[in-house]
Image (spheres, rainbow, N blue to C red):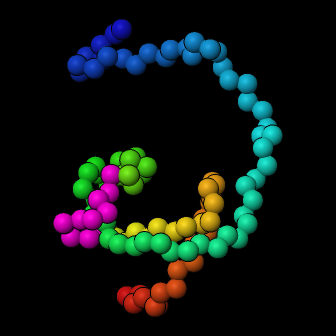
Amino acid sequence: MRSTGEGWLEALEIEHPLGDAAYRPSTVGDCLRLPVAATEIARGTYADRFGYANDDPPVRFVSRDLQPQLPDDGVWVRFDLGKIGLYRPCIAIDVPRGDHR
């Protein structure tokens, strides 16, 4: 390794031990968007207690405190979809028109 002269080492390119990937067109179809009735079973507020705004989103999601003693950062809602499955939600929220200043 060579030094850049500023205390940093020059970056090295390392070949992947399994070689280059063989890319090809996808053989899996698009996800279906079937309507599913959702029943609200719980709701509350949450506070972001851990992490930072630019952290990995899944980590921030599971690190939220659902019974916060701190000021609220948002609202959470839990739904029962009737069965276990992988879902890609499409959520429509009816709210009053905002003030666009």
Q: Nearer the viewer, residue 51 or 99?
A: 51
Residue 4 in sight in this render: yes
Left or right placement of residue 38 versus residue 3 in this view: right
Classified by dominant secondary structure, the portion drawn in magenta counts as: loop
Is residue 64 part of the magenta span, yes or no? yes
Residue that appears at 32% across and 57% down: 64
Image quarter in which the N terminus is found: top left
Tell me the magenta residue range. Answer: 63-73
Magenta-colored stretch includes residue 77? no
Image x and y of residue 92, in percent: 57, 77
Residue 22: % across, % down: 73, 24
Image quarter for residue 32?
Answer: bottom right
Q: Is residue 61 left or right of residue 19?
A: left
Give the image location of residue 45, x and y in percent.
32, 71
Quadrant in the picture for the C terminus? bottom left
**Residue 93 at x, y = what percent?**
52, 80
User: Residue at the spot x=68%, y=23% of the render?
Assistant: 21
